[in-house]
Amino acid sequence: MNKQLIRHGVILMVLASLSGVAPMVVTNARMGLSAHVGGIMNALLLLALGAVWSTVTLTPSREGLAARLLLWGAYGNWAITLLASITGAKEFAPLAGAGYGASAVVEKGTLLLITTAALCTLAGLGLVFSGLGKRQ
């Protein structure tokens, strides 16, 4: 699992780096910058978790669940914020979205998606923390 997390951390790092040009081409440049920085931070989280994964003791099913939750949270956070920068959605980040707006469906959709990504990240981290320090 650690190699998978490291691989995805590198992939997300590349994607987030490429989205660093987003502020020049999206509707909301501040949200585009947020997507770039958020993607880099989530990539670093995946890389760090991959580096310490051997110290986490979970059942195979819980390990797989934790990884899937963390991957959805990391990629989802980046992609949804990038989508918000393209559409002008602002509801989930009113400071970065000040002065912009999108249709109600887009606003509620991005809010729902970013909420699920955040909850998945928290749940995945909770699983990882529950498996730290356990003896085999």
Image (cartoon, rainbow, N blue to C red):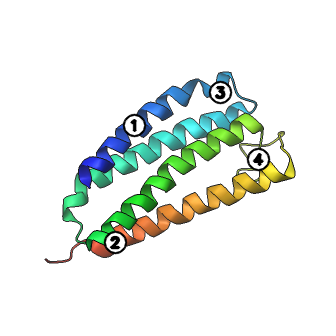
How far across and how far down the image is residue 39, in percent? 50, 41
Q: Please identify the quarter of the rendering in which residue 36 is found.
A: top right
Q: Amino acid at mark 1?
A: Ile
Given residues 96 and 63, the one toward you in this image is 63
Q: Which mark is residue 87?
A: none
Residue that carries the numbered disc 3 in the rendered image: 23
Residue 117 in the image: above or below residue 86? below
Q: Nearer the viewer, mark 4 or mark 2?
A: 2
Cα gap from disc 1 to disc 3, whole angstroms: 20 Å
Q: Secondary structure at mark 3?
A: helix
Residue 66 in the image: above or below residue 51? below
Q: Secondary structure at mark 1?
A: helix
Residue that carries the numbered disc 4 in the rendered image: 90
**Quarter of the picture holding the N terminus:** bottom left
Residue 11 in the image: above or below residue 131? above
How far across and how far down the image is residue 21, in percent? 58, 23
Labels 2 and 1: the sequence-earlier one: 1
Q: Residue at x 42, y 31 (%)?
A: 14
Cα gap from disc 4 to disc 2, whole angstroms: 35 Å
Cα gap from disc 3 to disc 4, whole angstroms: 15 Å
- Tag 2 near tag 3, CB within 8 Å: no
